[in-house]
Amino acid sequence: MAEFPALNGQSVSYAVLHYPAGTVNPPHTHPRSAVLPFLVYGTLQVRFVNTTNKLIPQTLQEGGMIVFPKGLVHFHYNADGQNPTLAISGMGSANAGAVSVPNNVFTTSIDDNIFSESFKTDAAAILQIKGGLGSKTCLDLLNGSNIGFEGLGKDSIINASGEQIASLAIVQMAIAGDADITSDFVLPSNVTQVNGTFFTFTGMRVLVGAEPPVTFKVLKSSIAEFPALNGQSVSYAVLQFPASSVNPPHTHPRSAELLFLAYGTLQVGFVDTTNKLFTQTLQAGDIFVFPKGLVHFQYNADEKNPALAISGFGSANAGTASVPTNVFTTGIDDNILAKSFKTDIATIQQIKAALAPKP
């Protein structure tokens, strides 16, 4: 929309992405839109990771097309060592935003201790990744890359920043949470009559009088646990933080989060699409909003006392994509991750090993 003001309110825009041989568009998200890339020429390896941490792979040939669902981590890789690739991406927002996982997470002053806890690794590995991303030695299509823009002619190339790509590579879609319903509520197919019990969720009763857990724990009241929420565009989660525990960097692709701190203290933060970090230390009774689709985290820095928070969402199924597990435990090739995070394969394998499920 910044380049083409007539798109304002029209819910459509385009980006043309030019990939030199062997280049990667690192893992990233578009928090306000799905993406529909069309491959004009060349070949392109494309992947996205859903909120169950399943990697969905595909290799596109000329004329191929794939949809990346809104807010999910995805990437593109031109594995051809000799030939370039060109793709046209349409998105459902006049300002879909672009969140590069490497830069959004590792170049925004989030505390190293939070990283070490989140990625189950040591400070040395974190500092190595931070140093590599600070050097800007590799092509990063989300930060200062060459973007081919068809409106300038096929042979015209412009240098674009991540913000320019966000506005150039977007298609607008009106986003207001879940789809609206035309009835008071939605019944499951196997239910014909209901009473108050159907609209009551008792799963949080386990919290009453319970001891704090030994590790960070989430109790959800979403459509999966509480079917009466279908069509109601609302859900809850209770977040239990033992002393010195962290809820690692993650996103909710389908909703903002409104967090209320019931007791304890909590360090919270989110990173916007310009890679600016916003932080706050919450006291009991405070409320903090995490905008929809943006990377955020919570950390109980108190070494002795637990904390408990209640989060509300504007969706019955907001989804959760944990950055460490979404990126490092889903089978993305080590070479792609090393290129994306501007580090070596040994560091990538160290992080993968630490995050791998324990037998």
Image (cartoon, rainbow, N blue to C red):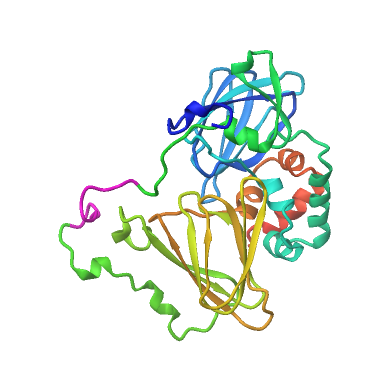
Please tell me whether residue 94 is drawn above or below residue 225 in the rendered image: above
Place of residue 298 in the rendered image (x, y in percent of width and height, measured from the top left) = 61, 66
Question: How many callouts does the rendering have?
Answer: 0
Q: Quadrant of the C terminus?
A: bottom right
Q: Identify the residue at horizontal 42%, vertical 78% (top origin).
A: 206
Q: Is residue 220 visible?
A: no
Please tell me whether residue 341 is drawn above or below residue 208 in the rendered image: above
Question: Horizontally, is 313 left or right of 109 in the view?
Answer: left
In the image, farthest residue toward the left: 193
Q: Is residue 194 visible?
A: yes
In which quarter of the view is residue 230 placed?
bottom left
Please tell me whether residue 313 is drawn above or below residue 285 in the rendered image: above
Place of residue 125 in the rendered image (x, y in percent of width and height, measured from the top left) = 81, 56
Q: Is residue 187 magenta?
A: yes
Question: Horizontally, is 313 left or right of 136 in the view?
Answer: left
Question: Horizontally, is 112 left or right of 235 in the view?
Answer: right
Residue in front for this viewpoint, 235 or 8: 8
Residue in front for this viewpoint, 303 or 150: 150
Tell me which segment is drawn in magenta.
179-191
Place of residue 63 in the rendered image (x, y in percent of width and height, measured from the top left) = 54, 18
Residue in front for this viewpoint, 240 or 5: 5
Please tell me whether residue 46 is drawn above or below residue 312 in the rendered image: above
Q: Identify the residue at horizontal 78%, vertical 56% (top origin).
A: 126
Q: Identify the residue at horizontal 65%, vertical 45% (top origin).
A: 274
Question: Horizontally, is 121 left or right of 299 in the view?
Answer: right
Q: Identify the residue at horizontal 46%, vertical 50% (top origin).
A: 254
Q: Is residue 307 magenta?
A: no
Q: Quadrant of the N terminus?
A: top right
